[in-house]
Image (cartoon, rainbow, N blue to C red):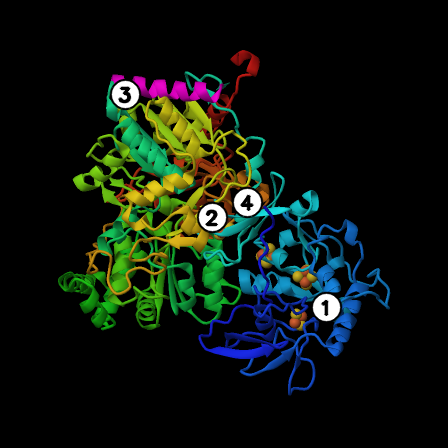
Amino acid sequence: MSLVHEIDYGTPRSKSEKEVTLTVDGMSVTVPEGTSIMRAAMEAGTQIPKLCATDMVDAFGSCRLCLVEIEGRAGTPASCTTPVTAGMVVRTQTDRLKKIRKGVMELYISDHPLDCLTCSANGDCELQDMAGAVGLRDVRYGYDGAKHPNPGLDESNPYFTYDPSKCIACSRCVRACEEVQGTFALTIASRGFASVVSAGMEEPFLNSECVSCGACVQACPTATLNEKSVIEIGTPERSVVTTCAYCGVGCSFKAEMRGEEVVRMVPYKDGKANRGHSCVKGRFAWGYATHKERILKPMIREKITDPWREVSWDEAFNYAASEFKRIQEKYGRRSVGGITSSRCTNEETFLVQKLIRAGFGNNNVDTCARVCHSPTGYGLSQTYGTSAGTQDFDSVEHTDVVMIIGANPTDGHPVFASRLKKRLRQGAKLIVVDPRRTDIVRSPHVEAQHHLPLLPGTNVAVLTALAHVIVTEGLVNEQFVRERCEWDEFQEWAAFVSEQRNSPEEVAKISGVPAETIRQAARLYATGGNAAIYYGLGVTEHSQGSTTVMAIANLAMATGNIGRPGVGVNPLRGQNNVQGACDMGSFPHELSGYRHISSDATRELFESLWGVPLDNEPGLRIPNMLDAAVDGTFLGIYIQGEDILQSDPDTKHVAAGLAAMECVVVQDLFLNETANYAHVFFPGSTFLEKDGTFTNAERRIQRVRKVMTPKNGYGDWEITLLFAKALGYVMQYDHPSQIMDEIARLTPTFTGVSYERLDELGSIQWPCNEKAPEGTPVMHIGGFVRGKGKFILTEYVATDEKTGPRFPLLLTTGRILSQYNVGAQTRRTENVVFHGEDRLEIHPHDAEQRGVRDGDWVRIQSRAGDTTLRALITERVAPGVVYTTFHHPGTQANVVTTDYSDWATNCPEYKVTAVQIAPSNGPTAWQEQYDEQARQSRRIAPLEAAE
Ligand code: SF4
Ligand code: SF4
Ligand code: SF4
Ligand code: FES
């Protein structure tokens, strides 16, 4: 296997539909209007020398290496900045051009240190390549680059270095930071010969605005900006295209390897979700895969107070299987269950739910999607008929108005945020509905037209007020509604939202958002052209999460913003495979493709292939499993790739549930917090060590490809197979592709999906079947999946979690760019440099009232529990609201969150907790006790003792 070389066309693709034909070096070539001569030549197979041009950014025309001659025109224009015209005749290689190029290269090389043999980019340097391409043989002005400005090496960023002595001032990095990433962290300081790239106010990269996305490193043609891993290991020798295992954007990467070692992860330009971009997590934070704390041997223990004992895989499987059989014999078939992972592949998730339904003989399967996007599934299936977002990410390029609700894309979905910001810089308008002033509200060259800083818990009221304005001001797209939606339900809904109690003026009293702001936002959404809604967990993780999703769906239908590019309802999924985990039948009431377990016809389909009868009763959800454990009726659980102790609400209740079980089997990379309560530990594998697929937030199924041998011995799918075999339920697959074939046979929206088709097409957005053999980028074109769209009344019901004298502040939670979820992976990378602890954001007014200063330890208490963390005083949060991330187990932010949950799906109400804050001296008794218990629980007996 060799390196995957992507062609650099020099300038971005033109999106014009009109075509132009020209001649380049005697060859006729037809390209879209607006294409540069450089790109047209490349399409014709001629590579014009270049240094300052690359196809990820707009042409700049500074290096003068790409000059060409055009018949009938004087001079030698730069091919990167000159667009083609019909009938143009271009020559790229003449004596005059050769001479000019050699002269240009002579100047560059004379200003460059010639330490090629020891340079980290040796063999992967465009300056070297171009010297070869122009036939440079002599440099008249000396070689040493001694006069080159050199402010010194900057190694402050944990992942890349900046060596100004090698900079050719091409500004590719500056343009990448602006155009691709949208951060504007870099400038070219000084002028002419003294030009030098500078981060921020001439400060080290680490102290600047830089978010370490790596776009500048990718764009740099020399070793000036270079990955530290390349400097350390050397240039890669082979690459494999795979998919990021962090967030729901689903970026494609080339894993560039040397032997079994990852040299670097390079964003793949053909990746349809990311189009060649990345964020710090996928690009750089893979070090956890080889972290010393990774567990590589299976372990068991009889009691959770015992130290772990390393055992053979066989012993671990047999022990877990015998325990599960014993529990089922003693307490009944339904006394065990399992949890699938939104981080594992579709194939692995499918296998776990199959094991539970067919092997355990019950439907006690649930997934962590329960705690994030289950309301999306419910809300969208009720209104539109399918449980997924409606658009692809490319759709944002056609959007005129973007409404972001309860999402923080620059932190949570950074690559999508970069694409969105690009569209906003082109002139699209922005509405942000969020209690916090998130970065997207105001960032370089982007400013929201309207920010609705609503009080946590009032989403439904505000969305219904937006609908009130749209209906009462005559902004409904009646033609769309009449053609595409159920008219009676619409009328009922229109009458409901028009009631005075749903007016912006009334809702302002509840939500804190000025009525006029609501009115203006509604008018912009309804009349501003193509309007798209993107939302996140700030919508779903509420007691009215499902109602909020339905309110969003109503708005899109009422304004006709559904069923074409540029519009739609788009949940930004948190984890890499949260969409896939839901699609694969991870919920207790649904088989793959969201078909209810009580349907005889559906069950029969699965039963005939699996050869066992299936229980027709929906099983237990995670909170019900924990309740049943405390009640003594649920005693065994198999948890693949989830850390429910840290990620689920009301930690003490989760701990009590786990502690009450007789056999907890955890399969993970690390001894996570849940493993403190486990009896069997199956060491898991990373995404680099297995084959499979992930499905991102756009319903895009993408391949995950094995690039190295599993350090633990098995891919996660193999572990499930072997555990099932030990239980006496044999599932026979030689490769995950066969699991996908079975999924395709059993799931109507997947019938056209196979590894062969995925390799052919790159990726596929479901539904993919006879009707849509190449998948479905945009859903509900011409009609809803359920037939007619259904308006549903969205009565606002205030959460039971209320502030009062005891708990006067509202806590809401979220995440940060550099960390991921419970942090198990990112905390074990250099990303800790960017975010080493969870902090509590508090408004200066609230802080002052409580005598809290920036950086002080504070105790945060709710009716569920208390914890301590350090304060960050900021006006990002409104008075009365506090905010924290939940990436560090030491903080245990979920000790504070309550057991309130969405009425339809049990999705926990993470986003609203009434709390009080007080200065503190240090950890609470619970934190200290927890730390000690975790320390005890992670003991591994020395091998001699185990034998
Ligand atoms: S790493 Fe990204 S954010 Fe940082 S300077 Fe480079 S392009 Fe800009
Ligand atoms: S750092 Fe690299 S990309 Fe940036 S101007 Fe210098 S050579 Fe060009
Ligand atoms: S974490 Fe998300 S945005 Fe970042 S590289 Fe991975 S998939 Fe892309
Ligand atoms: S590549 Fe065209 S001017 Fe540099």
- Residue toward you, 210 or 4: 4
Do the CB atoms of the residues marked 3 and 2 lie less than 8 Å apart?
Answer: no
First of labels 2, 1 by sequence position: 1
First of labels 3, 2 by sequence position: 3
First of labels 1, 3 by sequence position: 1
Which residues are the magenta region?
Answer: 311-330
CA–CA distance between discs 2 and 1?
39 Å
CA–CA distance between discs 1 and 3?
74 Å
The reply to whether residue 167 is in sight is: no
Question: Mark 2: which amino acid?
Answer: Glu
Ligand 3 within 8 A of label 3's CB? no
Do the CB atoms of the residues marked 4 and 2 lie less than 8 Å apart?
Answer: no
Asked if residue 775 lies left or right of residue 479, the reply is right
- The residue identified by callout 2 is 841
- Residue density around tag 3, few if under 14, some if 14–19, many if 20 or more, within 10 Å: some
- Residue toward you, 774 or 365: 774
Classify residue 94 by image quadrant. bottom right
What residue occupies the far front of the structure in this picture?
26
CA–CA distance between discs 3 and 2?
47 Å
- Residue toward you, 1 or 454: 1
- The residue identified by callout 4 is 835
- Residue density around tag 2, few if under 14, some if 14–19, many if 20 or more, within 10 Å: many
Do the CB atoms of the residues marked 1 and 4 lie less than 8 Å apart?
Answer: no
- The residue identified by callout 3 is 328
Question: Mark 1: which amino acid?
Answer: Ser
Q: Nearer the viewer, mark 4 or mark 2?
A: 4
The reply to whether residue 643 is in sight is: yes
Q: Nearer the viewer, mark 3 or mark 4?
A: 3
Give coordinates of residue 35: x percent, y percent.
54, 74
In percent of the image, x 63 and y 64: which residue is there? 172
In percent of the image, x 52 and y 76: which residue is there? 34
Give coordinates of residue 680: x percent, y percent.
42, 23
